Image (cartoon, rainbow, N blue to C red):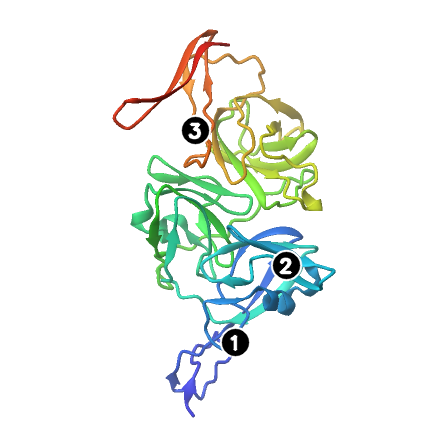
């Protein structure tokens, strides 16, 4: 009679209990915006028992009802089909280790009760893009929670409208922390298993939640298709200025310039009405510099790769001068990398010259000659 939940944060806490039987479940108020939300489930909407997965249909019925458009996992999805009055698709269950794009008609507040996910739950990454969860209810710095065995293996993490890139032994970009109930794309160079190293309460560094940066008058809707352009140098920019990404005249992303390499989001068209006019695969976005003091917009020029979903690009320089000529021969990073089945290779030249591009194996032996000829 005295066994039960002894955690005061638990919904089913009872002060008469003197033995904790592990049955505590918890409740959280969550906020979702219109369109695509990159989410994960620290707890499933079920207080009957702890489980690893939960019916997608039941989750939608309990929380979203007619506000639900669809949910997209790493390799499956589910959509509301009005004629059937239910869901169609291969995403029949949601689980604790995966992330999901949750697509809604309108913004909504939700209350969810269930059992928390253990912080030491194991994740299994494969080569390429992995859509995963984060098992916590608060934000933690990347450096605190990513285990040592991921160093140099996971070098890119994409969140909702923000990204982090591991370069020269440190994480750069606007995504400085991981937060519970959010989903993240982790790009891995090999198959690897891991668990987060979430510090005990009271031992972790206090970090703020990563908020979406908004430039009034240049708002854009979050899409489930996005990429990030990391720009190293903006010679004409001042701290506090903004970089705005466009597809024709449609704003598809913004980021404030803070004087160091910055990740500019670019939203792609994912089929939703909220993403009409956004960039499509193979199209090249454009960028403009917004002067925070005067409100003036200037076109930015540089070597800008074409849009690829869930990709991270590195752009050396964006400048307001259109006639910049490269001062040396340079070979850019291949993208996407790892690639399957194709990748893109770009190079710049200071003048017209004879160019030969070869693929070599790790021993330096010629695998294939891609091109040989004059290039401008």
Closest to the observer: 244 or 340? 340
Residue 213 is left or right of residue 15, and the answer is right
Q: Earlier in the sequence, mark 1 or mark 3?
A: 1
Counting from the top left corner in percent of width and height, residue 245 is at 61, 32
Looking at the image, residue 206 lies above or below residue 214: below
Task: Say whether marks 1 and 3 touch (CB < 8 Å).
Answer: no
Q: Could you tell me which secondary element the residue under label 1 belongs to? A: loop
Question: Which label number is shown at residue 70?
Answer: none
Q: Residue at x 30, y 27 (%)?
A: 361
**Pointer 3: what residue?**
334
- Spatial CA distance of label 2 from label 1 is 26 Å
**Pointer 1: what residue?**
47
Q: How many marks?
A: 3
Q: Name the image quarter holding residue 327.
A: top left
User: As drawn, which residue projects farthest toward the left?
Assistant: 363
Q: Which class describes the residues within 10 Å of circle 3: few (<14), some (14-19), or many (20+)?
A: some
Q: Could you tell me which secondary element the residue under label 3 belongs to? A: loop
Looking at the rendered image, the disc whose residue lies closer to the viewer, 2 or 3, is 2
Q: Could you tell me which secondary element the residue under label 2 belongs to? A: strand
Q: Residue at x 36, y 41 (%)?
A: 189
Looking at the image, residue 302 lies above or below residue 214: above
**Pointer 2: what residue?**
88
- Spatial CA distance of label 2 from label 3 is 37 Å
Closest to the observer: 89 or 178? 89
Does the image show residue 183?
yes
Closest to the observer: 221 or 79? 79
Q: Earlier in the sequence, mark 2 or mark 1?
A: 1
Task: Say whether marks 2 and 3 touch (CB < 8 Å).
Answer: no
Q: Residue at x 68, y 65 (%)?
A: 65
Does the image show residue 101?
no
Counting from the top left corner in percent of width and height, residue 83 is at 74, 60
């Amino acid at each position: 009679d005295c066994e039960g939940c002894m955690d005061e944060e638990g919904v089913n806490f009872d002060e008469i209990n003197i033995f904790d039987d592990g049955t505590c479940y918890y409740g959280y108020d969550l906020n979702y915006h219109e369109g695509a939300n990159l989410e994960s489930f620290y707890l499933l909407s079920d207080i009957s028992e702890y489980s690893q997965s939960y019916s997608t249909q039941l989750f939608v019925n309990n929380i979203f009802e007619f506000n639900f458009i669809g949910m997209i996992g790493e390799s499956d999805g589910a959509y509301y089909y009005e004629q059937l009055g239910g869901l169609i698709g291969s995403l029949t269950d949601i689980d604790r280790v995966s992330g999901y794009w949750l697509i809604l008609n309108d913004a909504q507040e939700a209350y969810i009760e269930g059992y928390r996910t253990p912080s030491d739950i194991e994740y299994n990454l494969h080569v390429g893009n992995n859509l995963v969860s984060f098992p916590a209810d608060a934000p933690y710095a990347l450096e605190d929670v990513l285990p040592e065995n991921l160093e140099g293996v996971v070098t890119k993490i994409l969140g909702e409208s923000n990204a982090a890139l591991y370069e020269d032994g440190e994480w750069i970009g606007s995504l400085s922390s991981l937060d519970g109930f959010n989903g993240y794309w982790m790009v891995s160079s090999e198959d690897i298993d891991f668990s987060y190293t979430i510090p005990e309460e009271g031992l972790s560094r206090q970090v703020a939640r990563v908020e979406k940066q908004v430039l009034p008058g240049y708002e854009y809707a979050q899409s489930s298709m996005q990429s990030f352009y990391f720009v190293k140098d903006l010679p004409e920019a001042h701290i506090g200025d903004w970089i705005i990404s466009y597809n024709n005249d449609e704003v598809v992303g913004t980021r404030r310039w803070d004087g160091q390499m910055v990740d500019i989001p670019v939203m792609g068209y994912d089929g939703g009405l909220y993403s009409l006019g956004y960039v499509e695969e193979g199209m090249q976005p454009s960028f403009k510099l917004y002067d925070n003091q005067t409100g003036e917009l200037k076109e930015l020029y540089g070597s800008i790769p074409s849009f690829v979903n869930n990709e991270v690009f590195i752009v050396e320089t964006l400048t307001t001068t259109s006639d910049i000529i490269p001062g040396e021969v340079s070979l850019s990073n291949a993208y996407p990398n790892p690639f399957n089945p194709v990748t893109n290779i770009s190079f710049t030249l200071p003048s017209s010259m004879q160019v030969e591009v070869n693929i070599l194996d790790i021993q330096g032996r010629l695998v294939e000659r891609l091109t040989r000829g004059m290039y401008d």
